[in-house]
Image (tube, rainbow, N blue to C red):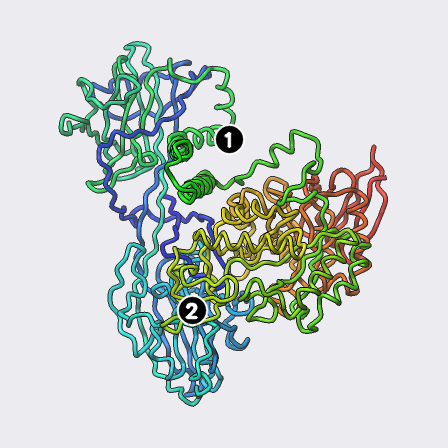
Amino acid sequence: MSTVTIRLLLPSCRRANLNFRDRTEILLKPNYINYSIKSAPNARRFCSFKKLQKITASSSTSTSTSTSPATSTDTTPVRPGDVFFKETFPLKRTHAVEGKMFVRLQKGTDEKNWQLSVGCNIPGKWILHWGVSFVGDNGSEWDQPPKKMRPPGSVSIKDYAIETPLKKLAEGDVFDQVKIDFDTRSDIAAINFVLKEEETGAWYQHRGRDFKVPLVDYLQHDDNVIGTKSTFGLWPGALGQLSKMILKADTSQSGIQDSSSESSELKQENKHLEGFYEELPIVKEIIIENTVSVSVRKCPETAKTLLNLETDLTGDVVVHWGVCRDDSKNWEIPAEPYPPETIVFKNKALRTLLQPKQGGKGCSRLFTLDEEFAGFLFVLKLNENTWLKCMENDFYIPLTSSSCLPAESVQEMLIPGKAEEATQEVSQTAYTAGIIKEIRNLVSDFSSDISRKTKSKEAQKSILLEIEKLAAEAYSIFRTTAPTFFEEAAVELEESKPPAKISSGTGTGFEILCQGFNWESHKSGRWYMELKEKATELSSLGFSVIWLPPPTESVSPEGYMPRDLYNLSSRYGNIDELKDVVNKFHDVGMKILGDVVLNHRCAHYQNQNGVWNIFGGRLNWDDRAVVADDPHFQGRGNKSSGDNFHAAPNIDHSQDFVRKDIKEWLCWLRNEIGYDGWRLDFVRGFWGGYVKDYMEATEPYFAVGEYWDSLSYTYGEMDNNQDAHRQRIIDWINAASGTAGAFDVTTKGILHSALDRCEYWRLSDEKGKPPGVVGWWPSRAVTFIENHDTGSTQGHWRFPGGREMQGYAYILTHPGTPSVFYDHIFSHYRQEIEALLSVRKRNKIHCRSRVEIVKAERDVYAAIIDEKVAMKLGPGHYEPPSGSQNWSFVTEGRDYKVWEAA
């Protein structure tokens, strides 16, 4: 059976800050497959592999049923020492699955009640990511619809979107679909949506924009509307054909900053709905995975080399092959005899048709070769246009046992589980060499250019940036389902201890973070002064770091839509008050994190098209500072290196002048205000390598990024395995070279389900480790249960009510750097939080502390940390083991309990 993995087909549309990268496997019947076209000329490029040692244990190999004289040794028994090479290689190719999506608007029970339906007929887990626009709204932002409008199974995404799964409404339905009922008497002007494939997070939208179904007449002429006033045709392009609409040229978009005078004249009475039904082509690109296995042995009777090749591919599979005499790997044709159904191709290679196995599960062939040859070269041919190679290179198989690995490593290869790891290592050798060579060439160029002084400083910086990008690409290439970090393995070889050196990614390792504001803090107008009065109190509770709100002048009062970066008069106070509160916290021994928004910036002026993308103030950038692929703000920069935030112009960090200005601004904040570190907003919007650049320039004491996207859910229920989610966070930390940590969104989400549904088994992964980022890279995980977005008055993703202290019992006793929300400190939870803070400080629990999970069952979770603290969550029973170590009870609350080693 062929395994098929869906791959992202279109660029990510980010309305909900979602981006899934997990590659979920789906089983499809082989006859569904129509292989993608890809030419593979007989190039002299090779995939080299580490050669296996002689296997001294008894082995077996598959044999062909061919009756060819050239393969007369097919029935030769395999004797000890015969097999000296055996390897399985992955085969991958792409396939485009074509289908349709439909959009239908129709009248419901009467003129006042209507229904919008969206469906798709391609198999998969489809999600409608949607929201509404209200009459009088400016710009292109969404709002959440009224609750009565949301179909069953819908999930809220922050405060502006809903996700609703598509499903078959009746047996035999071709389309998965969702139906949205609405009342025309409401003040909803339009329904906006994009379609998402949940298994991969691939987004399908209309020419890079959201689909819009207008419910009022004045929106009928918007370019991205779908309905009776739109016509459809082809949309060519390498990224696939979705929606395929013939549209007018894009009109300028002013985003949330547009204050058109026409908005005040919009009238709800303009609603005149007409039903419609449209079908749109949609393409989903998938990756088909198979394998080919090769074993080589010596025939004792004939001294010939016997190579057995088999694959799980079906149909007419041809091996295009030859041999070589030395390491130069020059193709040549061996002397006859050849296997049956072999032809000579242009006197350069041979082509042999593989023979189907019994039962039809793949095919194989045995090749008999003379001793004189050093290697066997091949590619697989499925048809005239489809060739399967090894990472774009020809397969190379060694034919001499003298070039095999030393015998001492043989047992490792025979241990279950090791063979797969070795296969991955072998199959990546050539590609690794290519990446390393490319980086070394860049370094050599850089070095020689410096010595000759023939290039400008800007050119040298460009080469360095390219090297960093290649390094980030290498991280991505060699990431598998296992985490791509190395800290845990290293730590296991030494005593558990905090870092001796302060790092911006970890601080000292003993930090306890306090978020010093909520979503409403700006309303007082003097928040800095109010917080100053609590400095001594927060320090005495045990907090070592406080996170302050965004300091800059902002379009939004909360500070997350900055405009003039050097203007520090905000709704929280002025620059003098900010300096005052920073000095006060320094006086009581606490460090201060500034909340900086680097992804986007609101403009001061409109361009000639009326689009807000010209900036004022000290950093008076023009539209070159805006990414080119944000459809709302017509930037002239390069394409975004991350996900776009559609509410304001997304800054192009690839521009030298932008990075220079940001580094100067951050250094100014460090020196002028006294910030010790950073909380980085919406880091999904730009490459982590730029963060590394900013961190190295400012040398913060501590830094943490907000990499927030959705966990994996199936019809509203959280999936058991969230490794793909935490891997995305790990990837970002890696891209930043560990110079900043990240909020452990994975742990928060898993705690939600575990505590709310009494599923405490979720708190242990398959290896018995914590299931969040804290289980893979604890020193870079900033754990939390609530913040200004998820809780407070926004409540985008509120922690299960009444279970907050279970959450704190977890993060304050476990490794990682815990963050406590301001609202919880100054509430009825204060005494319990204070007790847990005391336990952490007294036992010197730090970001790399060891966790031994001793119980993870339906109704109870229990763990021992650093052999000093024991804790349990849930209504189930647990007591720490009695024995050489005595335990004393410390504190408890609703469904949690903590002990200390005596």
Q: Residue at x 31, y 60 (%)?
A: 99
Q: Residue at x 36, y 57 (%)?
A: 10
Q: Residues within 10 Å of mark 1 (few under 14, many from 20)?
A: few
Quadrant of the rendering where the N terminus is positioned: top left
- The mark tally for this picture is 2
The residue lying toward the viewer, choosing from 47 and 515, is 515
Q: Is residue 412 left or right of residue 250?
A: right
> Can the viewer see residue 240 in this picture?
yes
Q: How far across and down, in percent of the image, does residue 182 sit?
A: 46, 80
Name the residue beneath numbered marker 2: 193
Image quarter of residue 120: bottom left
The residue lying toward the viewer, choosing from 749 and 535, is 535
Q: Considering only vertical position in the picture, is 294 above or below 111? A: above
Q: Considering only vertical position in the picture, is 272 above or below 6? A: below
Disc ID at residue 417: 1
Quadrant of the rendering where the C terminus is positioned: top right
The CA span between labels 2 and 1 is 45 Å
